Image: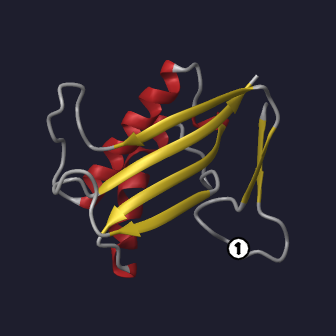
Amino acid sequence: MSVRRFTPDGLPQPAPYHHVAVGTGTRHVHVSGQVARRADGARVADDLAGQVAHALRNTATGLAGAGATFDDVVRLTFYVTKWAPEKIHEFMAGVEEVAAELGLPAPMPPSSLIGVEHLFEPDVLVEVEATAITD
C-alpha cells in the first residue's frame, strides 16, 4: 500500500481523522473541490449533512476516474460556509452516511475543515478536495 496513516503519541486522540499520512509512490492524484451536484449540475441536497455526503460521493467518483480510492488518500480538505462548532454533528452525520458505501476509512485520512464565508454559489454549503498517492 502506498499510504500509511497514523497519529503519533503526543497528538490529540481519539480524533475522527489521523494526524499524519506518509505516501510513497510516484503517481499523485488531485481531485478538485467537489460539491453536492449531479453530473447534470442539479443540486442534490439543501442541508449540510446531505451536501457533505454527496460531495464525498463525487470525490469518490473523481478518485475512481484516476484509478484511486479513499485508501489512497493522504489528505482531505473540507470548506464549509458560515462554519460554527455546533455544526460538527450535522457535518459528521454526512460523513457517517456514506462512510461504508464509499470505503471511507475510520479514522479518516488527515483532514482539515476550513470555515469560509461563502463558496462559488450561494446554495453550496461544502466543498471537498482530495489528494491521493498511488503506485
Using the rendered view, name the quadrant where residue 118 is placed.
bottom left
Q: Residue visible at 35% across and 55% down? A: 94
Image quadrant where one finds the C terminus: top right
In the image, residue 125 lies at what x, y percent? 26, 58
Image quadrant where one finds the N terminus: top right
Using the rendered view, name the quadrant where residue 89 is placed.
bottom left
Q: Residue visible at 62% across and 49% down? A: 75
Amino acid carrying label 1: it is: Gln
Dot 1: what SS? loop
In the image, residue 65 lies at what x, y percent? 48, 19
Q: Residue visible at 18% across and 32% down? A: 41
- Residue situated in front as seen by the camera: 17 or 121: 121
Q: Residue visible at 82% across and 35% down? A: 24
Using the rendered view, name the quadrant where residue 42 is placed.
top left
Vertical placement of residue 106 versus 69, above or below? below
Residue at image mark 1: 13
- Residue situated in front as seen by the camera: 126 or 91: 126
Residue lying farthest front? 120
Display colour scheme: secondary structure
Left or right: 11 as drawn, with respect to 70? right
- Residue situated in front as seen by the camera: 120 or 3: 120
Left or right: 80 as drawn, with respect to 105? left
Vertical placement of residue 31 versus 134, above or below? below
Left or right: 34 as drawn, with respect to 38? right
Left or right: 30 as drawn, with respect to 60? right
Exactly how many numbered labels are in the figure? 1
Vertical placement of residue 29 versus 50, above or below? above
Q: Residues within 10 Å of mark 1 (few under 14, many from 20)?
A: few
